[in-house]
Image (cartoon, rainbow, N blue to C red):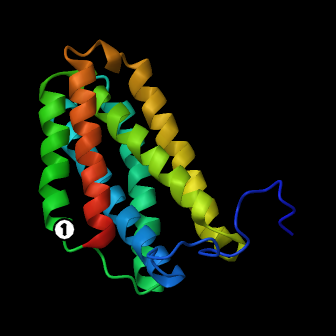
Amino acid sequence: MNNGRDKRPKITGEDLLPGDPDRKTLIERMIRVDHAGEFGAARIYEGQLAVLGKQPVGETIRQMAAQEEKHLAAFNELIVARRVRPTILSPVWHAAGFALGAATAAMGEKAAMACTVAVEDVIQEHYADQSALLGDDEVELRNLIDEFRAEEIEHKETGLAHDAEQTPGYRVMSEVIKTGTRAAIWLSTRI
């Protein structure tokens, strides 16, 4: 029972405002964008590994990439099980993700980690927002998103521990990557 202390709606979409998507559309958009995001993240790590895979940091990147592959596999299953149309932008995210990963890795380990910090910061906020919208009727999806959010936070912390903030031009680079990530989220939710 929602006794006023818990702000979470009992049913997903219960607190929608006029103009908000209906419950079905809301869930489809969540799955679509999360699938696209995990696909893009996997491609970013593939790009980083293409450049830094043989460096000592390569093992750290491989561990994060393995978690992203697990996330992607879960959303691959949800896309099919829930009959959600994937984003038509997948070919763009395929190329853009790899290019972002490879380009930042070519700038050095710290820049690759700065990319990770920026992307994961936006993604963990995105997952938190999604989790807050999901009611008790979508507890499995909410738990999955919460689990993946915790791992995205770990990736961000790993990047920070690898001196991401010491990248020359860190603040500008971070804001550019965050803006691009937010734009990718907006587009993949709808297209």
Residue beneath the point at 61% across and 67% down: 134
- Of 81 and 32, the residue lying toward us: 32
Indicate the secondary structure of the residue bearing disc 1: loop
**Left or right: 56 in relation to 102:** right
Q: Quadrant of the C terminus?
A: bottom left
- Which quadrant holds residue 173? top left
Residue beneath the point at 19% across and 58% down: 93
**Left or right: 94 in relation to 140:** left
Percent from the top left, x then y, of residue 140? 64, 70
- Which quadrant holds residue 138? bottom right
Q: Quadrant of the N terminus?
A: bottom right
Residue beneath the point at 20% across and 74% down: 88
Q: Which residue appears farthest toward the bottom when viewing the image?
A: 83
Q: Which residue appears farthest toward the front when viewing the image?
A: 18
Percent from the top left, x then y, of residue 42? 30, 52
What amino acid type should be assigned to the residue bearing mark 1? Leu
- Of 120 and 101, the residue lying toward us: 120
**Left or right: 50 in relation to 61:** left
**Left or right: 80 in relation to 88:** right
Percent from the top left, x then y, of residue 179? 26, 42
Residue 12 visible to the viewer? yes
Percent from the top left, x then y, of residue 153? 51, 38
Estimate how packed mark 1 is, as few (under 14), some (14 to 19) or many (20 or more) residues with alpha carbons within 10 Å: few
Residue behind mark 1: 89
Residue 53 visible to the viewer? no
- Which quadrant holds residue 33? bottom left
